Image: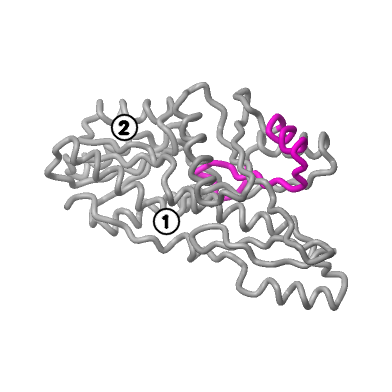
Amino acid sequence: MHNACAVRLGNGARAVSPLDEKGWLMTAPALVVMASGSRDPHVAQVAQDLRTGLHRLRPSMTIRGAFLGSSLPSGTQVVAQLARQGVKEVVFVPLELCHSSQVNPQLDATVERVREAFPAIRFVAANPIGPETSLLTILDQRLRSALSHAHCLELDGLVLSAERAGDVRGSALLARRARQWAAHHRLPCLTAVTDATGPSVAQAISGLRSQGRRHIAVGSFFLTADEAYRVQADMAYRCGAISVSEPIGAAREVLDLVLARYSFAAMDLLDFGLTDHAASDDANSDLTGVMLTGDDVQDAPLVSVVA
């Protein structure tokens, strides 16, 4: 049975690390960021940049990157390396912007495989990054830069373009982000996706043009400049968009969200001895003020697209 103490992770987020029987702080679980498999070098580069940024923020943590699908290193390969280093707990954090809950069967299969292969290690999969409000700040910054580069002086319509619609809650949140973005800039904003589960960027631009809008810019709600991003960017320009933003990339807001997801999921690896009344009281006392709330990552201010 372990007691626990709070450990600050990033952007005010705190996880709880257990204490061993002698009261010494035990090593925090290893963090493995899971990216979608792709042969595109942009995907691997952003995954590496994220890992580098996380190491810079938390140099004492064990942080690794892995890929789903056929790309290497796989989650199983990374866990095998961690096992040789004596790691006992691992938290997987999916680098997914459109889903709000874990619905990726590839990640579920990976977790099941490593649990069977490494029974001495405890595993938990965190919720994805998801379409958080704080990412609109980066979206604005990327679009402002694109508009400046294109010398755009007028803007009367926005498209929020994402790779996919995501799960039910993720899709609802993405639509909400579009409404927030529209309200902030007092411009109409439509959503678009590239996987045919919703309106395409061409349809979104056409919809804005039917409203009399002529100066339309596209905000790219993509993590990396992969093939899906390039397809939607090319389509947007062909349909007359005046500017398309760069992907969100390894921004500080993304790093903070990864740490927040890690912090919350790591709680599931703790044993507070809730079956013992006395230990239960101690554990509940230790938990005071530790839980991360949604307000910690959703109150970032936006900036204007056009100065």
Q: Is residue 137 above or below residue 95?
A: below
Identify the element where label 1 is drawn: loop
Q: Please give the name of the residue rendered at 62% of the width and 49% of the height, measured from the top-left corner.
A: 61
Which residues fall within the magenta stretch?
Answer: 76-103
Q: Amino acid at mark 1?
A: Thr
| 238 or 257, nearer to the observer | 257
Residue 266 percent coordinates (x, y): 68, 55
* Extreme residue toward the right, this view: 276
The 10 Å Cα crowd at callout 2, few under 14, some 14 to 19, many 20 or more, is some
- Which residue has dot 1 on it? 133
Q: Please give the name of the residue rendered at 82% of the width and 38% of the height, measured from the top-left corner.
A: 118
| 70 or 196, nearer to the observer | 70
Residue 161 percent coordinates (x, y): 37, 39
> Would you say residue 100 sits in the magenta stretch?
yes
Q: Is residue 268 above or below residue 79?
A: below
Residue 172 percent coordinates (x, y): 48, 52
| 57 or 250, nearer to the observer | 57
| 86 or 89, nearer to the observer | 86
The quadrant the N terminus occupies is: bottom right
Tell whether 237 sits left or right of 76.
left
Q: Please give the name of the residue rendered at 25% of the width and 29% of the height, measured from the top-left corner.
A: 237
Q: Amino acid at mark 2?
A: Ala
**What numbered label is drawn on residue 202?**
2
Tell whether 302 sits left or right of 97.
left
Residue 275 percent coordinates (x, y): 87, 70
The Cα atoms of the two marked residues, 2 and 1, are separated by 25 Å
